Amino acid sequence: MPETIKNKKIILAVLIFLAIITLATAFYGSTDISDYIDPAKFFSGSYAANIRSSHSFLFSWIISPFFALTKNFLAFKIINLIFIILIVYSVYFISRKDIRAFWLMLLSPIVWYLAPWVNPIIVSAFFLLWAWYHIDKYDKELSKLSLLYAGIFVGIALAFWDTILFFGAFLALPFLFNKKLSHSLLFIIAVLAGLLPRLILDYFLFNFPFFTMIKNLFGIIAIALFLENSPMPLAWRVVPILLIFLIIPLYFWKCAKPIVIKKEMKTLIFLLLSLLLILSNPQPRYLMALIPIMIVISSNYINRIQWRKQMLLSIIVSVIVIAPYIIQVGYHLGNDIHGIDVVAVVAGIKNLSVSTIHPSDLISQDLEEIEKEFPEESFIVGNTDDSYNSLARFYWGTGIKEFISIQDYNLWLDNETDLFKKRFAFLSNIEDRRYIWIEAGISKNPVDTTNYESLKYALSMDEKLDLNRFKLIKKYDLLYLWEKE
């Protein structure tokens, strides 16, 4: 029999503990940081560079006013905490106020793993959960209103996070494949309605409503088909997969029983397809989109003893995933500027470094000195194509004019604009006078106001700079300053 929420003081204590860890740790995530922090800083008017993002700008645009007021990155974490609470209560409500589902969600390792990360996954997971609730309700009642709600929620989720394009398709497939075509069209229209905020923002920023969606999708295709990825050590492939299976509720696999499959067939197809997608590119953070639904389903098929076992396992795994975050309250782990998560700790344990100094603090301090010594100057930043964004991210002054990517500077030197280009041509087998071709690629923005000819200085975080005719003139705590000869 479902129980109502009791022991509210314990719940409050758990939430406070989660908030303390999330806000106190110096860790902000290890993937796609620049795709969300940098645009937010740009929209707030405090980003001394051009931005490059491969994802939706909506999340960053919404947060940018808070970013402008606080001058730090905590707004992202606060949003995460708010939506975690919303997800936990939603799971409780959807499970017909089953307190077991409430606690399984609150103590789920994915919550504790993802809370400090800067990304919109938690926000989108909330809307995807309600999309699943309404499309499942539609399937049982054939209510077009529920289908409309489902589509709108998928659209809102997609407005924040691009991977929902795949999860949303996997959700619609089993629930709509045997329905009328008009119902599928209604769902698509509803998705577009939910997607409107992103489409409007894209049109305002890029004069094309589907700009960021197409850019992200084509980027995924280009990477998968045409660009060579460097080989990854075995540990970096195995550890994320192990963590994925540790995070998934153990008793979710009880749903493989024939009686459960028959009852929850469509939801299980959606979850299986989505899980296969995650395993194809193992990223534990993506599980946030699926775990709430898994908990709602599995809580119907476990007894109290199994629930207690699952709670114990969840607590153990949660302690493991937050251990690096707790350490990074006062220390810095690894070589990444933003710190590392449990995957990087385990996979890179042989080369793990611990420091009392945060590189981001050193960058900020160095740039404060540099802006005093070289006011109103622009700096090329190397050696990687995106090294410039780390400096722009942690610079809060106004004396430096601009940080410029070494990639853009090299393109200017070579009088080039194209970064990647692919042309598909269809040649006929007969003597036809015409043929057709399709070409796509990525280029440097032709509207570029940077005066590359006047650039005299460069910065790097290495003792070497991959540019000719530049000599080292000063070493700061972390940065190296170079001058053009």
Image (tube, grey):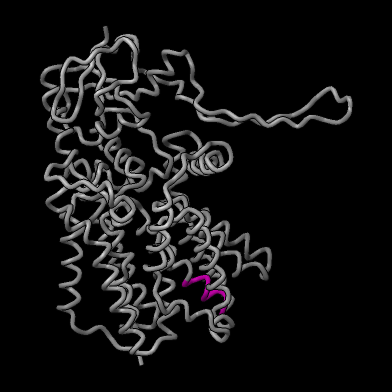
Q: In the image, is residue 137 part of the stretch drawn in magenta?
A: yes
Point out residue 115 in the picture as x, y percentages from the top left corner.
Answer: 27, 59
Residue drawn at point x = 41 percent, y = 55 percent: 283
Q: Nearer the viewer, residue 17 or 227?
A: 227
Of residues 226 and 428, the one nearer the viewer is 226
Q: Is residue 195 left or right of residue 374?
A: right
Residue 386, image x and y in percent? 35, 31
In the rendered picture of this protein, how many numbered marks are placed on residues? 0
| Residue depicted at x 35% and y 48% | 59
Q: Name the side, left or right, on which 186 lies relative to 196.
A: right
Q: Residue furthest toward the front?
A: 350
Residue 326 % position (x, y): 17, 58
Q: Position of residue 34 (x, y in %)?
A: 33, 40
- What residue is shown at x 68% (from left), y 70% (from top)? 178
> Where are the magenta residues, as a range?
133-140
Q: Is residue 317 left or right of residue 201?
A: left
Prevailing secondary structure of the magenta residues: helix
Q: Quadrant of the N terminus?
A: bottom left
